[in-house]
Image: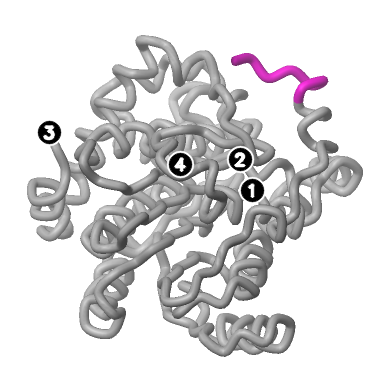
């Protein structure tokens, strides 16, 4: 599918169904949302809190802000099963610590995991593990957390993994150049050697969102067919949120003119997490609460080759810093 400006505007102003129309009881279920103290994650958490979850864990980088969010959600919804856990998905050690803690305190299963946390950084910054921040957080950290939480997801009767993607993946500059076995390492250079690797027009953010779509699809392909796990990637639309705080003035003005509110955008995450009509539709890309065809590159032969290479490189990188990753893959996933 090609994304035109007309299609973009049509999607932006589409009326999205309210969670009450597809919501379910989450009694006895464990829900985790990353980056849930602000923006899309916070609004999604409020919607899910109204469905009476057994546990609703806000996995956030800043514990103080997370505790404030917990109190705000409790006040707004009356749900008292909300709690905050520290998690910085850009840090290998933080991801491992969260997973280890959940093994001890989490109750065994995760019914819903929404990987919402991410960054949009136009300048060169690095994660605690020395990766370029967009790639290291949005893809490597997201993949790491998905792998580490997979054993808990697979203990639930109808688990769902939701990964926040974006329609900016349609606009990645020369995406065919992603088709290489050292993609992640090539994007980690201090200075880009060409426009594909560069920061012009937030290219590395767009690439990271393309990786989200590719990773969600190939992860679903490695989940055994006997498993009920549903994996989806979700476009929340162009939203007025803190994600654009580091962007230029003109983009922020445009955002104010056409951006969705974070409450409206959050409905897409909640829909992917609980709507009955999504159950079993694994590996799909969702936009405006409907299965949508991703970019022409993603569905092309080159896109399929790229996701296989991205999978191999990601597994290799994570296996070197966390021995649990290859163990989990060999134990729970098909090859």
Left or right: residue 321 compared with residue 292: left
Q: Residue at x 22, y 83 (%)?
A: 104
**Along the viewing direction, whichever of 282 and 147 lies nearer the viewer:** 282
Residue with the mark numbered 3 = 335
Which numbered disc flags the more N-terminal residue, 1 or 4? 4
* Residue 294 on image: x %, y %: 54, 24
Between the C-alphas of marks 1 and 4, the distance is 11 Å
Evaluate whether residue 236 shows in this view. yes
- What color scheme is it? one colour
- Looking at the rendered image, the disc whose residue lies closer to the viewer, 4 or 2, is 4
Within-10-Å neighbours for mark 1: few <14, some 14–19, many 20+:
many
Which numbered disc flags the more N-terminal residue, 2 or 1? 2
Q: Residue at x 59, y 38 (%)?
A: 166
Q: Quadrant of the C terminus?
A: top left
Q: Where does the magenta region start and end?
A: 1-7
Query: Is residue 4 within the magenta segment?
Result: yes
Name above or below for residue 2 compared with residue 44: above
Between the C-alphas of marks 2 and 1, the distance is 7 Å
Residue with the mark numbered 2 = 235
Within-10-Å neighbours for mark 3: few <14, some 14–19, many 20+:
few
Between the C-alphas of marks 3 and 4, the distance is 20 Å
**Mark sitting on residue 268:** 1
Between the C-alphas of marks 4 and 2, the distance is 10 Å
Residue contact at pointers 2 and 3, CB within 8 angstroms: no
Residue with the mark numbered 4 = 232
Left or right: residue 241 compared with residue 269: right
Which numbered disc flags the more N-terminal residue, 2 or 3? 2
């Amino acid at each position: 599918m090609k994304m035109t400006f007309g299609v973009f505007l049509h999607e932006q102003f589409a009326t999205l169904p309210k969670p009450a129309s597809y919501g379910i009881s989450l009694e006895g279920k464990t829900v985790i949302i990353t980056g849930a103290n602000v923006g899309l994650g916070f609004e999604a958490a409020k919607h899910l809190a109204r469905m009476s979850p057994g546990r609703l864990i806000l996995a956030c980088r800043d514990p103080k802000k997370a505790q404030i969010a917990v109190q705000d959600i409790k006040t707004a919804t009356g749900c008292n099963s909300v709690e905050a856990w520290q998690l910085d998905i850009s840090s290998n050690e933080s991801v491992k610590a969260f997973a280890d803690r959940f093994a001890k305190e989490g109750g065994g299963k995760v019914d819903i995991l929404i990987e919402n946390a991410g960054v949009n950084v136009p300048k060169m910054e690095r994660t605690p593990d020395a990766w370029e921040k967009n790639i290291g957080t949005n893809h490597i950290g997201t993949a790491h957390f998905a792998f580490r939480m997979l054993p808990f997801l697979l203990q639930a009767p109808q688990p769902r993994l939701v990964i926040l993607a974006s329609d900016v993946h349609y606009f990645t500059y020369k995406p065919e150049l992603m088709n290489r076995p050292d993609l992640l390492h090539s994007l980690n250079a201090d200075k880009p050697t060409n426009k594909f690797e560069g920061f012009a027009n937030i290219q590395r953010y767009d690439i990271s969102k393309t990786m989200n779509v590719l990773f969600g699809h190939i992860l679903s392909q490695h989940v055994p067919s006997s498993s009920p796990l549903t994996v989806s990637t979700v476009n929340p639309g162009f939203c007025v949120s803190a994600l654009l705080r580091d962007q230029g003035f003109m983009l922020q003005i445009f955002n104010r003119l056409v951006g969705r509110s974070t409450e409206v955008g959050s409905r897409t995450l909640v829909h992917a997490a609980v709507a009955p009509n999504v159950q079993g539709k694994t590996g799909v890309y969702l936009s405006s609460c409907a299965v949508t065809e991703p970019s022409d590159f993603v569905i092309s032969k080159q896109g399929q080759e790229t996701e296989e290479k991205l999978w191999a490189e990601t597994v290799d990188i994570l296996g070197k810093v966390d021995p649990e990753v290859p163990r989990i893959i060999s134990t729970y996933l098909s090859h």
